Image (cartoon, rainbow, N blue to C red):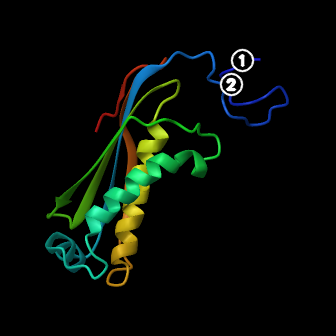
Amino acid sequence: MDPLSHFDAKGQARMVDVTVKADTSREAVARGRVTMSRETFERIREGTIAKGDVLGVARVAGIMAVKRTADLIPMCHPLLITGVNLDFSLDVAHWAVDIEARVKISGKTGVEMEALTAVAVAGLTIYDMCKAMDRAMVIGEIRLIEKSGGKSGHFVREE
């Protein structure tokens, strides 16, 4: 049986055995977007949302989510994360908050799921903090932008 297979001899899903893999430097970048009403966008930008600093709280939530990804995604390995950057940019033309997560590790498996989880949870946190004034917000376009390290090498999304 291939130790890197996602299935056992009976065809059952299982966590991949990474014992034989070498530790390498790995990094993943994911992005997403939350679109909203103009009023909600302006209040986030001005820092006047009733629940507080929306982007500050979303940053902390995304970083916390990176550390808990293995608790949320059944076949993810718990990882010793070495770095997380979570950044936001405001798209005035589309009343949107763009989210970018960059996650780093030196280990046996990649951090794509951690980067994607950071973006998703940061987006959900923005929604939670602003939902009283805008239930029509849309969290979307969550995608892997780049990953490096490991046997599969370097991936860059063409956008």
Residue at 21% x, 67% y is 95
Q: Considering depth in this image, is 157 or 52 the residue closer to the camera? A: 52
Circle 2: is it few (<14), some (14-19), or many (20+) Cα within 10 Å? some
Tell me the amino acid under the disc marked 2. Ser
- The tag on residue 122 is none
- Determine whether label 2 and label 1 are within 8 Å by CB: yes
Residue at 70% x, 20% y is 3
Q: Please provide percent x and percent y for residue 56.
A: 27, 62
Reading the image, the residue beneath label 1 is 2
Tell me the amino acid under the disc marked 1. Asp
Mark 2 vs mark 1, CA separation in Å: 5 Å
Residue at 30% x, 34% y is 158
Q: Quadrant of residue 17?
A: top right
Q: Please provide percent x and percent y for residue 88.
A: 24, 55
Q: Element type at marker 2?
A: loop
Q: Quadrant of residue 126?
A: bottom left
Q: Considering depth in this image, is 107 or 134 the residue closer to the camera? A: 107
For the C terminus, which image quadrant?
top left
Reading the image, the residue beneath label 2 is 5
Image position of 149 with respect to 132: above or below: above
Q: Considering depth in this image, is 2 or 51 the residue closer to the camera? A: 51
Q: Please provide percent x and percent y for residue 130.
A: 33, 76
Q: Please provide percent x and percent y for residue 62.
A: 39, 54
Circle 1: is it few (<14), some (14-19), or many (20+) Cα within 10 Å? few
**How many numbered marks, from 0 up?**
2
Q: In which quarter of the image is residue 149?
A: top left
Q: Element type at marker 1?
A: loop
Image position of 80 with respect to 67: above or below: above
